[in-house]
């Protein structure tokens, strides 16, 4: 499951490994799909969705590669009615690369990109049992002053009719001086 490596000028050290962080391309769609399948409890969307994320929304998504292997992916988008808010859809880190701070580094990579200067809020949804995501976004919240708020976004019974766990909305105002 390797992807073509582009220039190593974007490579950074995370712990002892050399990482490349880049915008995804249309060629990454299938690899993103396969990565997400290996990352429960993430919902597996259609491969077509991952192709759209990797092309139409690539300015707000990130791929993390190590030695040409896709190890992480974040899908995100600017909310159409709120251009200062970034919604993080999914954070996927291959089981082989967890525990290295990779997800947090990918989040920061997106926030440091040109065109993201006006983003002052991050939102995401998390199910109750996804402890990895809770830890990641609590860390981001702490970095930005710990002013985040959690509310119910999609209720298990009301919205999902019992077929999916409740999704909690975590809204984090960004301290742009952090």
Image (cartoon, rainbow, N blue to C red):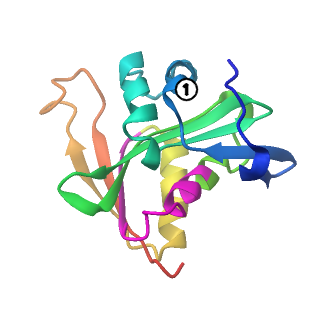
Taking 80 as reference, is 3 left or right? Answer: right
Image location (x, y in percent) of residue 17: 84, 44
Specify whether 38 is left or right of 150. right
In the rendered image, the vertical position of residue 136 relative to residue 33, given as above or below: below
Identify the residue shown where x is 14% and y is 32%: 159
Residue 16 locus on image (x, y percent): 87, 48
Which residue is at the far front?
7
- Residue 46 seen in the figure: no
User: Residue 173 sits in which quadrant?
Assistant: bottom left
How packed is label 1: few (under 14 Cα within 10 Å), some, or many (20 or more)?
many
In this picture, is 49 found above or below 92? above
Question: Residue at 43% of width from left, 63% of height from top?
Answer: 115
Q: Which quadrant is home to the N terminus?
A: top right
Measured along the vertical axis of the image, is residue 30 above or below residue 174? above
Q: Nearer the viewer, residue 37 or 73?
A: 73
* Number of numbered discs visible in the structure rendering: 1
Front one among 99 and 4:
4
Q: Position of residue 21 (x, y in %)?
A: 65, 46
Horizontal side, residue 131 vs residue 70: left or right: left
Q: Is-magenta flag for residue 5? A: no
**Quick one: 154 or 10, which is closer to the camera?**
10
Residue at 48% over, 73% down:
144
Q: Is residue 50 above or below residue 105?
A: above
Which residue, as the protein is rendered here, is positioned at the far bottom? Answer: 177
User: Which range of residues does the magenta coloring cover?
Assistant: 106-128
Q: Which residue is mark 1?
A: 28
Is disc 1 placed on a helix, strand or loop?
helix
- Where residue 164 sits: x, y (%)? 28, 25
Left or right: 19 with respect to 49?
Answer: right
Residue 165 visible within the image: yes
Please report the residue visible at 52 percent of the width from the left and 70 percent of the height from the top: 142
| The C terminus lies in quadrant | bottom right
């Amino acid at each position: 499951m390797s992807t073509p490596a582009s220039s190593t000028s974007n490579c950074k050290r995370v712990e002892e490994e050399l990482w490349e962080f880049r915008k995804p391309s249309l060629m990454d769609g299938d690899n993103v799909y396969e990565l997400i399948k290996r990352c429960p409890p993430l919902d597996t969307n259609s491969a077509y969705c991952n192709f759209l994320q990797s092309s139409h929304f690539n300015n707000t998504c990130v791929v993390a590669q190590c030695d040409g292997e896709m190890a992480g992916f974040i899908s995100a988008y600017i909310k159409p009615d709120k251009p200062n808010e970034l919604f993080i859809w999914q954070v996927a880190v291959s089981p082989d690369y967890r525990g290295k701070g990779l997800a947090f580094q990918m989040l920061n990579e997106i926030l440091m990109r040109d065109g993201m200067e006006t983003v002052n809020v991050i939102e995401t949804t998390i199910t109750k049992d996804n402890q990895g995501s809770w830890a990641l976004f609590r860390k981001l919240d702490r970095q930005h002053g710990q002013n985040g708020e959690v509310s119910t976004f999609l209720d298990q019974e009301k919205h999902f009719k019992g077929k999916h766990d409740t999704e909690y909305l975590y809204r984090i105002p960004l301290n742009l001086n952090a």
